Image (spheres, rainbow, N blue to C red):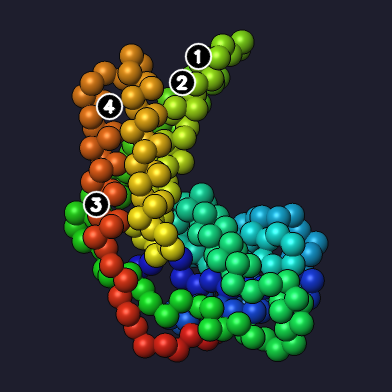
Amino acid sequence: MSMILFACVIRVRDGLPLSASTDFYHTQDFLECKRRLKTLALQLAQYPGRGSTEGQDFRIHFSSSGDVACMTICSHQCPAAMAFCFLETLWWEFTASYDTTCIGLASRPYAFLEFAPSFRMEPVTALGILSLILNIMCAALNLIRGIHLAEHSLQVAHEEIGNILAFLIPFVACIFQCYLYLFYSPARTLKVVLMLLFICLGNVYLHGLRNLWQILFHTGVAFLSSYQILTRQRQEKQSGCGV
C-alpha cells in the first residue's frame, strides 16, 4: 500500500482546488477523510503555513505559502518529514509552472488538472525494501546521536556544533533518500548525488566519534539506497486524473 494516497493543490484565499491526483482508494474511511480535507481546504487561510490532522486510519498534512497550498492524505506509516518534503516539492513545481496571475484568475475547480502526474513508479523490490529499512535505521542512529550530543553540550564549542550538524544533516539526507526512492522527483540524479555527498562528508567528519566499520556501514547503505533510487523507473499509466 502506498504511503501517500492522495494529493491536491488548493488556492488558499477561497479553498478552490486547482489540481489533484487520481483517486485510487474508495473505502469509507478514505472517503470520509477526503470530505474532511475539503472542509479544511476552505479554512486554510485561518491556519499557519503547515500542519497535520489525525484520522482513524489516515493523516492529512498541508503546507502553504502565499496563495497556494498543497495537501495530502497519507497512511499512518508515512513519516511526517517525508510527507512535508513531498508537499514542498509539489508546491515548488506547481508555482514554477503557473504564475500568480493565472492562479488568481482561475474561476473553475481543477483548472490546472494537467499538472497532476500521469505516472507511477515501478513496484518496490525486496532489495529496495531492505535499503529503506537500513536507511531508516541510519537516520534514527544519526538523529539519536545528534540529539544526545546537543543535550549534553551546555556550552557548545565550535567543534561540537560541527559534530551535531554532521549527525543531523545525514539524518535529513537519509529521510530524503527514502522519499526519492518511493516517489518520483524532477532532477532526481542531482538530488541523489547531493544526498550521497552529504552522508559521506558527514561520516568522514565524524571520524573519531565513529569507528571505521560504522562509517563503512553508513556510507554503504547510502550507496545502496542511491543505486536503488536511480534504477527504479517510472511506470507509465493511462491518463485519468481527477478527484
Place residue 11 in its image quadrant: bottom right
Rounded to the nearest whole Å, what is the CA distance between mark 4 and mark 2? 14 Å
Callout 4 amino acid: Ile
Dot placed on the residue nearer the N-terminal end, 2 or 3: 2
Dot placed on the residue nearer the N-terminal end, 1 or 3: 1
Q: Label 3: which residue?
A: 227
Rounded to the nearest whole Å, what is the CA distance between mark 3 and mark 4? 18 Å
Compared to 208, does 24 lie above or below? Answer: below
Callout 3 amino acid: Tyr
Secondary structure under the numbered disc 1 in the rendered image: helix
Dot placed on the residue nearer the N-terminal end, 3 or 4: 4
Residue lying at 46% horizontally and 70% vertically, measured from the top left: 5
Rounded to the nearest whole Å, what is the CA distance between mark 1 and mark 3? 33 Å
Q: Label 4: which residue?
A: 215
Q: Label 2: which residue?
A: 163
Q: Quadrant of the N terminus?
A: bottom left
Question: Are discs 2 and 1 less than 8 Å apart at CB?
Answer: yes
- Using a 10 Å C-alpha cutoff, classify the residue at mark 1 as few (fewer than 14 neighbours), some (14 to 19) or many (20 or more): few
Dot placed on the residue nearer the N-terminal end, 4 or 1: 1
Secondary structure under the numbered disc 4 in the rendered image: helix
Which residue occupies the foreground of this view, 141 or 94?
A: 94
Rounded to the nearest whole Å, what is the CA distance between mark 2 and mark 3? 27 Å
Q: Label 1: which residue?
A: 159
Q: Is residue 78 left or right of residue 53?
A: left
